[in-house]
């Protein structure tokens, strides 16, 4: 054994010691090996096989199944380009290609020659309102345009050199608090710079010796306005500062907690003189709104919403258990444990009409009953937090912001079902959610809420966290179980259903995160209060991630039965720019596209299903006329095709062949026969696939074919009406060109000759359609033909 | 016990049984590729789909447990269509040829790759036996065949095609007479056949009829037999003694030659028709002149000879060779002679005249359950990528084409032939008869082209193991081998690698199939539903 492999063996042994040598430890072990080495060295994997029950076949199968794992060394830094739906419609592909050009990557290389950067596409960073967004290591950049990728890399490297902003220690000391300042620290807030804002805030407070309670709260939902800071001062209306920047913090704080003279300065307008590197192209100044101000975009955004899963949104510190208990937290659990039988709890949930929020909408009470009715000494409850839809981040927000609520929901489910163990299955891409839940569980265990004898009763229930490793299909319950058991995440045949034979063949209750988060409210307020909200078949509320071409995007919780129009126009503020509302993509890759003419449809499980789409996990992307529906269908299908586990024929090959036909159509080479075959294959794939992923993968194709067939037909004739499909468009410069030469200077492929003061020309042979010239032209002379 | 209905018939089976098992209890056979008794069936191929009227979608019958009151339909149009689509999708991602392109191109469908392998092993006698399965005149054709097979050879773009035609000649030249079972003695069955014309078609027809015990009389208007082979081909191309020796072989088999016997209409009607049980016309005449000579009447389409059955308006009278249309190649006439003989044989045995099993791009019939089924070469890959040459060269030799030292005229020496035959790439499938993909694709009429992608995957071939060959791109990813290696406790074993469309069966780490299949190689190869994992040296024949 040489030195290198000895070193690897020592580290690997340490990791194995942490997780034990059982087969189901394989994923955590690989995750830690990768954490250590940045990839999976073969000697490390062989060492694991030598020292544990894990076989070479298992470790090879697992390490090549989950996208998280790498078999080649990665660069020092990871560039993750978000290709979520919102980013896709805002040009993420251009950004990705621009980074590849910047790093001089060839063919299928993903790492530059100097091994500094490794680039990858990720399904969703959950910053839909900053689209297109990218992340380098822990730094997120929003509104990135291809032109600026070089700057982004330079900025990142300079930050590396100068060090990240130092978070000052919390202000401490006696004396009366003058008020409270709340700052959101959800992933999207952090992505848009809220931790820098918080650091600056704490510095200011410390220097000025102001005694204010700084409350860090979970996701505020108003992602379109983040970072957001709320100042609460006795005797004053709460004031919200939206899109605030670190350098603005000091003045804002001093305006509230010093003589009023400062405030007038803000009323007169505050101009930010600093280059906003974190959000190129975003408005350059923060906006201030006073609470209860009727016509503010904030109140409009929040107005039609009903907060159950997101109760106390923007108020509660996610891991402040005392705060949670003061607000009534764990009362529902105690009510169940002390005053209700298991059957009564199940009945209450059944009567509420709650249906699973993971997509299919199976009645939750019935599922609980099935598990309760199983006579087994050991049963499991799994919280499905493997949210992976591009353009959806509800579960992440709930797990990050309301960990105690979901834990309480799981404990109630565990009690009702007679279960003994709980597992949080959370995607690896959600590190903050994993941290928060882990921390919250630690606190709960300390307080006797999780573990042996919950709240001193006879009910014992332990909960652990399992980090997924990057496989969308693991959102499917049987694949999720396979994954926890240490297998490749392959869905299996149902029946038997997990309620009978789930994890380790024991009865297993699998509920979606959002479903569990609604449970405490239902127990507290009663099933009647819940079933009062919504439609005949769909009760309560649903959380959606609203993004795309609306003015105001973000996380919203709306009552079932609300119309799509209300969401788009009232909450979302209508379409941004001068464009028109064309369609809404609902339900992510399993859902479909509804035309604007269906906008008065109510949000309801059955209504959506009838329209060919589904509730899905709650992505809601608004599209305007510049979005090509063939492109959208291609986008979603390429996602599911990429995420297929590869087990059954229709999903493995069928989705690939459909994608091939869409490619052909997108490039103007499609024939009417292709449309017929596409539709036929889509239907067969729906009918002949084993699991939900395959069965619903054709939905985006089928709904666009149904609702926008004329767009497909236009492509057959060689036209892309929206100007999106690259092979069918060309860039041209019209006579309004002022000859500023900007485009010629920036063109990465020298397709534009440098001719000062003359009308420029794009050589179609050289043009790579990167869109840079169009984006930087100061007089909008560049058009897509 | 659980009661259910399958195809409107009541069934009663034990709880826990699958729909497929329940169907089998009623004698309903549902096709399946990924199912293997004794292993946890994890449906993947979706060829066993059936309709459960209680559900929206179709269900895989191999894994669906029966439930009380279930109503299953196994043969509805949508079920059949879905199975066909599943097969078409599998075919679109199946890289390999059901039959080697040389064999497909050969009008006589000679099993060229097998002949090559036998010659390479020095077994010229068995090689000749393989040749004679299809070709009645191997020696003659070894001289005059234009060898369309060589144009299709996958080796051709690499350096030069395998010298198939000369190898065929060498099979005759180097046959070990001591081992030769030829001409075999066949018991006469008492049926008499007349063959008019002694060109390649007539001689071939006689060869087949004699082999199956018929008495044959060949009528020839010229002084010597051989037809166009004797009178239109120069001695430089085909030495007369070669032709004579080939005709002599047929004579030794028991053929009676009536030379210098031109056939008049009267002679045909008065002597031949009443005197023989079957007649094969191989005179080289066509159309009206043929009809006038033998008194034939046109069928509905206006032809005098049915191109599928080789039958004519006269019962028991068949026609072949140039009689049907001008044949450019003797090998085509030889092939037709065989087919006409087979039709005559069937007529003599059963009185039935039915379509040739070789019509319309199909060849060879297999007997399954008393029913004749066509076998087609459903999977065709086309030319190899240059990056694939090394994969196939593993079972071949890199040396370029051998030129006979004694010039083409004399043919190969024994050693030369063996060396040249070893250049064959073995691009034919090792499971031409048992591959389920081929079997069901034939049955369901599934084609490979419908869903063919714009590009195909790169094929690979692993030959490290002594007993089996693994070709990853023939695999349908059913995972049976993965399960077998796991259940039987292989130390290394096989695993799924990757995900989705690119998932493959692979050996963990940098090991090979040799380490992976220490004890389960045969079991895996036998369970594999396609030619992906196949026994290396056991020749499976698709005749």
Image (cartoon, grey):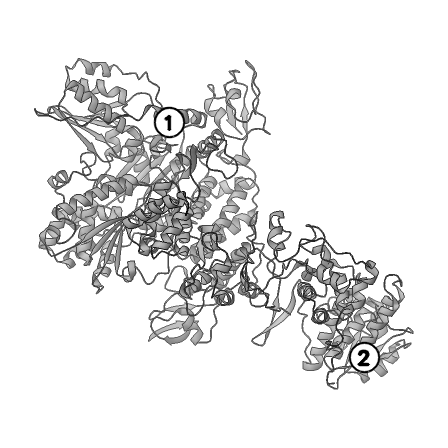
Q: Distance between the residues labelled 1 and 2?
A: 92 Å
Residue B170 position, x and y percent, is: 76, 65
Query: Who is closer to the viewer here, A699 or A83?
Result: A83
- The numbered mark 1 sits on a residue in which chain? A
- Work out whether A140 lies above or below A28: above
Mark 2 falls within which chain?
B
| Residue drawn at 40 percent across, 26 percent down | A152
In this rendered view, identify the residue nearer to me: B309 or A102: A102
Question: Of B291 and B511, which appears nearest the observer?
Answer: B511
Q: Look at mark 1 in the image and give the residue it sits on.
A: A156
Q: In which quarter of the image is residue A397?
A: top left
In the rendered view, would you say B472 is above or below A77? Answer: below
Label 2 Cα crowd, 10 Å radius (few <14 / some 14-19 / many 20+): few
**Picture coordinates of residue A417, whole percent (x, y):** 20, 58
Residue A305 shown left or right of residue B297 in the figure: left
Q: Would you name the residue on which mark 2 appears?
A: B252
Callout 1: SS = helix
Q: Where, by quadrant of the figure, is residue B221 drawn? A: bottom right
The furthest residue to the left: A175
Residue B233 vs residue B522: left or right?
right
Q: In this view, does A674 lie to the left or right of A638?
A: right
Q: Give the x, y percent position of residue A740.
A: 51, 15
Asked which secondary structure carries label 2, the reply is helix
């Amino acid at each position: 054994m040489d030195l290198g492999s000895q070193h690897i063996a020592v580290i690997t042994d340490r990791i194995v010691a942490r997780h034990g040598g059982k087969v189901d430890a394989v994923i955590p072990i690989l995750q830690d090996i990768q954490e250590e080495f940045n990839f999976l060295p073969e000697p490390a994997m062989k060492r694991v096989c030598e020292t544990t029950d894990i076989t070479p076949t298992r470790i090879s199968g697992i390490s090549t199944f989950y996208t998280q794992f790498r078999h080649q060394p990665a660069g020092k830094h990871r560039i993750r380009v978000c290709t979520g739906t919102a980013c896709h419609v805002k040009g993420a592909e251009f950004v990705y290609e621009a980074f590849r050009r910047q790093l001089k990557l060839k063919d299928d290389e993903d790492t530059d020659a100097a091994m500094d950067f490794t680039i990858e596409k990720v399904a969703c960073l959950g910053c839909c309102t900053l689209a297109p967004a990218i992340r380098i290591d822990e730094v997120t950049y929003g509104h990135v345009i291809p032109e600026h990728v070089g700057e982004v890399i330079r900025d990142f490297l300079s930050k590396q050199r100068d060090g990240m902003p130092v978070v000052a220690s919390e202000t401490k000391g006696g004396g009366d608090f003058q008020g409270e300042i709340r700052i959101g620290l959800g992933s999207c807030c952090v992505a848009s710079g809220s931790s820098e804002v918080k650091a600056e805030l704490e510095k200011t407070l410390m220097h000025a010796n102001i005694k204010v309670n700084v409350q860090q709260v979970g996701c505020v939902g108003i992602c379109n306005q983040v970072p957001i800071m709320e100042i609460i001062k006795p005797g004053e209306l709460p004031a919200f500062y939206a899109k605030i920047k670190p350098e603005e913090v000091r003045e804002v704080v001093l305006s509230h907690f010093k003589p009023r003279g400062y405030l007038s300065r803000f009323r007169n307008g505050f101009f930010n003189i600093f280059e906003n590197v974190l959000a190129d192209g975003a408005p350059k100044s923060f906006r201030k709104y006073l609470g209860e101000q009727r016509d503010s975009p904030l109140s409009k955004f929040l107005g039609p919403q009903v907060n159950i899963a997101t109760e106390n949104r923007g108020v509660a510190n996610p891991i402040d258990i005392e705060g949670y208990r003061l607000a009534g937290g764990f009362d529902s659990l105690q009510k169940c444990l002390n005053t209700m039988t298991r059957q009564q709890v199940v009945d209450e949930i059944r009567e509420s009409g709650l249906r699973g929020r993971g997509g299919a909408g199976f009645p939750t009470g019935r599922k609980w009953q099935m598990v309760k009715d199983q006579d087994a000494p050991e049963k499991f409850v799994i919280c499905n937090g493997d949210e992976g839809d591009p353009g959806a981040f509800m579960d992440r927000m709930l797990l990050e912001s309301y960990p105690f609520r979901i834990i309480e929901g799981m404990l109630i489910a565990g009690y009702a079902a007679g279960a003994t163990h709980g597992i949080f299955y959370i995607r690896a891409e959600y590190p903050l959610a994993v941290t928060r839940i882990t921390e919250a569980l630690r606190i709960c265990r300390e307080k006797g809420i999780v573990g042996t004898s919950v709240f001193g009763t006879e009910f014992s229930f332990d909960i652990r966290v399992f980090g997924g490793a990057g496989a969308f299909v693991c959102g499917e319950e049987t694949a999720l179980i396979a994954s926890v058991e240490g297998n490749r995440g392959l869905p299996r045949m149902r029946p038997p259903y997990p309620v009978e034979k789930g994890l380790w063949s024991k009865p297993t209750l699998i509920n979606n995160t959002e479903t569990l988060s609604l449970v405490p409210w239902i127990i507290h307020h009663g099933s009647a209060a819940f079933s009062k909200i919504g439609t005949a078949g769909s009760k309560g509320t649903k959380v959606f991630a609203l993004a795309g071409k609306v003015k105001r995007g973000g996380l919203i919780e709306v009552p079932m039965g609300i119309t799509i129009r209300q969401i788009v126009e009232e909450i979302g503020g209508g379409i941004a720019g001068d464009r028109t509302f064309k369609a809404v993509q609902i339900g992510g890759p399993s859902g479909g596209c509804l035309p604007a003419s269906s906008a008065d449809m109510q949000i309801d499980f059955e209504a959506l299903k009838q329209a060919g789409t589904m509730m899905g996990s709650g992505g809601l992307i608004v599209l305007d006329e510049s979005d090509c529906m063939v492109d959208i269908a291609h986008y979603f299908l390429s996602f599911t095709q990429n995420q297929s586990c590869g087990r059954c024929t229709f999903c493995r090959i069928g989705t690939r062949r459909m994608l091939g036909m869409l490619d052909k159509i997108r490039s103007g080479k499609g024939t009417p026969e292709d449309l017929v075959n596409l539709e036929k294959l889509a239907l067969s794939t729906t009918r002949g696939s084993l699991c939900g992923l395959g069965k619903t993968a054709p939905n985006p194709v089928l709904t666009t074919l149904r609702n926008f067939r004329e767009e497909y037909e236009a492509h057959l004739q060689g036209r892309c009406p929206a100007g999106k499909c690259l092979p069918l468009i060309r860039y041209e410069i019209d006579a309004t060109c002022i000859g500023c030469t900007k485009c010629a200077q920036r063109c990465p492929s020298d397709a534009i000759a440098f001719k000062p003061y003359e009308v420029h020309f794009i050589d179609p042979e050289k043009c790579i359609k990167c869109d840079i010239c169009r984006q930087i032209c100061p007089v909008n002379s560049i058009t897509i033909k | 016990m659980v009661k259910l209905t399958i195809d409107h018939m009541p069934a009663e089976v034990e709880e826990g049984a699958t729909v497929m098992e329940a169907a089998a209890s009623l004698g309903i056979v549902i096709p399946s590729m990924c199912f293997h008794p004794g292993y946890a069936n994890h449906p993947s191929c979706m060829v066993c789909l059936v309709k459960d009227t209680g559900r929206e979608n179709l269900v895989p019958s191999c894994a669906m447990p029966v439930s009380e009151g279930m109503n299953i339909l196994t043969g509805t149009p949508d079920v059949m269509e879905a199975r066909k689509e599943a097969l078409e999708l599998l075919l679109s991602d199946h890289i390999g040829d059901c039959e080697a392109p040389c064999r497909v191109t050969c009008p006589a469908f000679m099993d060229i790759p097998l002949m090559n392998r036998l010659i390479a092993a020095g077994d010229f006698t068995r090689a000749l036996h393989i040749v004679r399965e299809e070709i009645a005149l191997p020696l003659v054709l070894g001289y005059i065949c234009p060898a369309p097979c060589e144009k299709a050879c996958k080796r051709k773009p690499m350096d030069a095609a395998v010298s198939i035609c000369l190898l065929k000649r060498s099979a005759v030249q180097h046959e070990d007479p001591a081992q030769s079972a030829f001409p075999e003695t066949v018991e006469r069955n008492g049926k008499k056949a007349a063959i008019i014309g002694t060109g390649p078609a007539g001689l071939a027809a006689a060869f087949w009829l004699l082999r199956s015990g018929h008495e044959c009389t060949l009528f020839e208007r010229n002084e010597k037999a051989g037809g166009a082979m004797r009178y239109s081909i120069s001695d430089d191309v085909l030495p007369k003694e070669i032709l004579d020796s080939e005709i002599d072989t047929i004579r030794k088999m028991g053929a009676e030659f009536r030379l210098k016997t031109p056939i008049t209409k009267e002679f045909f009607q008065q002597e031949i028709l009443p005197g023989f049980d079957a007649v094969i016309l191989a005179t080289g005449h066509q159309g009206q002149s043929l009809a006038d000579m033998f008194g034939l009447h046109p069928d509905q389409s206006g032809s005098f000879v049915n191109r599928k059955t080789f039958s004519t308006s006269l019962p028991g009278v068949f026609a072949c060779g140039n009689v049907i249309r001008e044949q450019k190649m003797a090998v085509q006439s030889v092939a037709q002679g065989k087919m006409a003989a087979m039709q005559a044989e069937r007529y003599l045995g059963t009185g039935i005249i039915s379509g040739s099993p070789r019509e319309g791009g199909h060849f060879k019939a297999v007997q399954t359950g008393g029913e004749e089924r066509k076998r087609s070469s459903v999977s065709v890959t086309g030319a190899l990528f240059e990056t694939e040459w090394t994969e196939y060269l593993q079972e071949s030799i890199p040396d370029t084409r051998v030129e006979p030292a004694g010039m083409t005229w004399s043919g190969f020496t024994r050693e030369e032939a063996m060396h040249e035959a070893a250049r064959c790439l073995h691009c034919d499938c090792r499971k031409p008869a048992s591959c389920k993909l081929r079997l069901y694709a034939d049955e369901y009429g599934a084609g490979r082209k419908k869903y063919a992608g714009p590009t195909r995957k790169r094929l690979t071939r692993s030959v490290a193991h002594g007993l089996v060959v693994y070709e990853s791109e023939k695999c349908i990813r059913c995972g049976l081998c993965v399960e077998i290696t796991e259940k039987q406790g292989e130390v290394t074993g096989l695993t799924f690698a990757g995900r989705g469309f690119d998932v493959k069966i692979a050996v963990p780490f940098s090991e090979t199939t040799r380490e992976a299949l220490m004890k389960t190689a045969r079991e895996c190869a036998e369970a594999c539903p396609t030619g992906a994992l196949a026994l290396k040296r056991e020749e499976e024949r698709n005749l």
